[in-house]
Amino acid sequence: MIPHGVEVFVCLEPVDMRWSFDRLSNLAVERVGREARSGALFVFFGRRRDALKVLFFDGSGMCQFYKRLDRHRFQIPTSHDERAVAIEIEERELDALLDGIDVSSAKPGPHTPGGPKPRVH
């Protein structure tokens, strides 16, 4: 179960699934504008979209959750702004995403670090 109120950011460009804590932490800063230790969840997809990683800080250290689907592919949310490299989704959308459900029909605009207006990353 995903904690209520946690920020969830989905990076839209695929990453190498061999990347670990340091490289993914850097991507959180580069693509989302948030430090990996901010308490948010950062979701990264592999090129084939059959695997994803969620990077998060649990208060005592960095953690990664890795999931690979047996069949099918993860349906990556899309942004109305084609230049966006990351978007913010709600916890319930992440739950659905992890179950392999398409969440693209109910998505917010691109993530805006530190403000309410959408901004391209």
Image: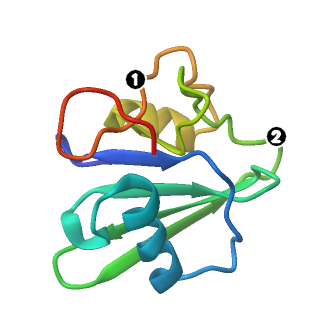
Query: What separation in Å lies between label 2 and label 1 (alpha carbons)?
Result: 24 Å
Q: Which residue does the image show at 44% across and 75% down from the upper left?
A: 26
Q: Please tell me whether mark 2 or mark 1 is closer to you in this view.
A: 1
Drawn side of residue 5 relative to residue 101, left or right: left
Residue 107: % across, % down: 45, 22
The amino acid sitting under disc 2 is His
Q: Which residue does the image show at 40% across and 47% down from the upper left?
A: 9
- The answer, for residue 55, to whether it is visible in the render is no
Q: Which residue is mark 2?
A: 72
Drawn side of residue 118 relative to residue 38, left or right: right
Q: Is residue 15 above or below residue 99?
A: below
Residue 49: % across, % down: 75, 49
- The answer, for residue 99, to whether it is visible in the render is yes
| Snapshot quadrant of residue 33 | bottom left
| Snapshot quadrant of residue 81 | top right
The answer to the question of whether label 2 and label 1 lie on touching residues, with beta carbons closer than 8 A, is no
Drawn side of residue 40 relative to residue 5, left or right: right
Residue 99: % across, % down: 58, 39
Q: Quadrant of the C terminus?
A: top left
| Front residue (pair 83, 102) | 83
The amino acid sitting under disc 1 is Pro
Q: Residue furthest top?
A: 105
- Please tell me whether mark 2 sits on a helix, a strand or a loop: loop
Q: Is residue 76 above or below residue 109?
A: below
Q: Which residue is mark 1?
A: 108
